[in-house]
Amino acid sequence: MRVQDGKRSAARWRAILEARWRLRLQEVTELSVAYHAAASGGIEDRQARRLLRRAVAARQRLADTEDALGRVAAGAFGGCEQCGTAIPDVLLAAAPESRYCPRCAAAAAGTAATGTMGKSTMGKGTMGTAAGRR
């Protein structure tokens, strides 16, 4: 019975993440088109740079969602990549792309703020996103 519950849970998370992926892909597409129109249309550099920053951030969110879908497929979704404990469902409901439990995310945020973490996989206090890996 436990395996079936896990399969149902994985299917539910996959559906949630796929819906988020579609929305994020649409956002990346729209921002990219707007940036290219602004850059080629002679619109103020400031506006084009703002659109580019938004497009890059949207692309990172899309990549985070793709990574989470990969974890669902691999059967590793919902576990902290640092310590291996389960990420609370309430955190996953708010941010299904989360990679780390609250304790490990807080530790990463604290060390990243002091600059002692270097090029770790959890830098920049990303609260479980792939952004800290890049």
Image (cartoon, rainbow, N blue to C red):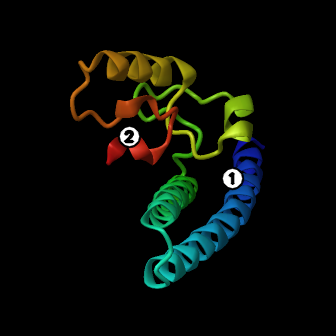
Q: Amino acid at mark 1?
A: Ala
From the image, tell me which residue sits under label 1.
10
- Residue 67: in sight, yes or no? no
Residue at 50% x, 36% y is 128
Query: Which corner quadrant of the image does residue 24 belong to?
Result: bottom right
- Residue 19: in sight, yes or no? yes
Report x, y in % for residue 88: 67, 27
| Number of marks present in the image shown | 2
Looking at marks 2 and 1 on the same chain, the residue that comes earlier in the sequence is marked by: 1
Element at badge 2?
helix
Mark 2 closeness class: few <14, some 14–19, many ≥20 residues within 10 Å: some
Report if the CB atoms under discs 2 and 1 are less than 8 Å apart. Answer: no
Q: Amino acid at mark 2?
A: Gly
The label on residue 85 is: none
Query: Does residue 17 sit above or below 109 in this rendering?
Result: below
Residue at 58% x, 54% y is 72
Query: Does residue 101 sit above or below 114 in this rendering?
Result: below
Q: Nearer the viewer, residue 84 or 25?
A: 25
Considering the image in quadrants, where does the N terminus appear? top right
Report x, y in % for residue 65: 57, 56
From the image, tell me which residue sits under label 2.
132
In this rendering, position of residue 110 left or right of residue 100? left
